Image (spheres, rainbow, N blue to C red):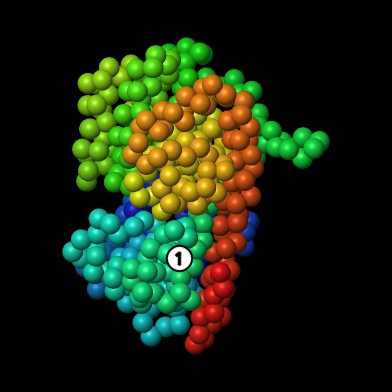
Amino acid sequence: MKIAFLLGSLNRGGTETLLLDVFCNAKVNNLNAIGIYRKTGALEVEYVNSGVSVFKLSYNKNLINYIKNLRRILIDKEINLVHAQQPLDALFSHIACRGTKIKTALTLHGYDYNDKGLAKSILSYIIRQTDMNIYVSDTQREYYQAKFKLNPLKQKVVYNGVSFERLNITHQMTLSSNHQMTLSHQLSTSNKIRNELNLSPETILIGTVGNFVSVRDQFTICRFLKRLNDNKIDFHFLFIGKQDKKMPQLYDNCINYCEQNGLSNKVSFLGSRNDVPELLREMDAFIYSTDHDTFGIAVVEAMAVGIPVFVNDWGVMREITEDGKYATLYKTRDEESLLQQFMLFLQNKPAYQAKATEAAKFVREQYSIEKHIEKLKAVYKQLVISDERLVISD
């Protein structure tokens, strides 16, 4: 069984990082795959060196040739199933695979809240034509299944996975004699970002990870930082993520707010970084605010490092943290609720660190890249061997 993954660009983002982890771990997990992408990006070299054969196929305003070339590659490489990561690529696969036995699966990584015009029409059509739709959380699956009245047998949840080897977590964790996990993170002497920003060892280092796009709500974090500063807390906050060209105001609004409220010396906007795992390990706590994330890889990565995590009570975040068992939840868009929770953390750090240690163990078991690939392979197998009926059990 051979799978072709279709991607858009290879820029640094949640979907691209996930697929790169899949590619880098494909061989050892017996996943026979190729990758086909339409646009280059910052991760192109890493994809080329991932161990999976990748092909750049741009349509350059000639869609007919693109479909022909895509079909040729799929047939020549003896592909059994195409796994698209965007509705547009699923549509391309659906057209290119007509008359063949090649099937199409689509993972929906986001919601359709901002879809308009052609994008809205493509999703409405292709979500009913694919052989399988894959969702990254049950909350997301329920939304799409209800909205489009989809056949439940053709909808499947496969949680995203994280490569803990990439995060350098494998030798961060040990098991004590009573089988409780401990983290050497607490003993880490790395001060890379503190030295870079000339921060005092006593300064509480907090941060978040994520590009400034509509699915996130960094502005609530900014309002929280003002309240934290009003309470005379010695802190420094790291915003890790780049400005979005389509919605630059999301980044600009945060910059302006911090400047206007005297936070410029307490907040650093670092842009896109390739050393996020190292920066996470230096943080005392991680804060995330979402508007409509479908999963939250950044949250899982922070939990995996073993630092206390604060995230708003959006449905997906309740799901992946088991309703706050493995992270501290605060009310969505409510900086006062976040402040209250964070002040409790400052008053009792050992208890929050103990919870973070349990969270790290939980996400290693629940959201590993190996488990993600295993679940994908199960879906692929059932799709490829099915002839007339899909019988997919949850």
The three-letter amino acid code for the residue at tag 1 is Ile
Name the residue rendered at 28%, 71% in the picture: 124
- Residue 26 visible in the current orientation: no
Where the C terminus falls, by quadrant?
bottom right
**Residue 196: horizontal and vertical position, in percent?**
43, 18
State the residue at coordinates (20%, 65%).
118
- The quarter of the picture where residue 146 lies is bottom left
Q: Quadrant of the N terminus?
A: bottom right
Seen in the picture, residue 43 relative to 58 is either above or below; the reply is: above
* Res 167 quadrant in image: top right
Q: Position of residue 133 (x, y in %)?
A: 43, 69
| Above or below, 151 relative to 299 | below
- Where disc 1 sits, the SS reads strand
Percent x, y of residue 325 = 57, 43
Q: How many marks?
A: 1
Q: Is residue 340 above or below residue 10?
A: above
Give the labeled residue for mark 1: 134
* Residue at the spot 47% in from the left edge and 16% down from the top edge: 203
Q: Residues within 10 Å of mark 1 (few under 14, many from 20)?
A: many
Q: Is residue 87 visible?
A: yes
Residue at 29% x, 74% y is: 125
Extreme residue in the bottom direction: 388
User: Observer-nearest residue: 196 or 345?
Assistant: 345
Q: Position of residue 278 (x, y in %)?
A: 52, 31
Check the image and name the residue furthest to the right: 177
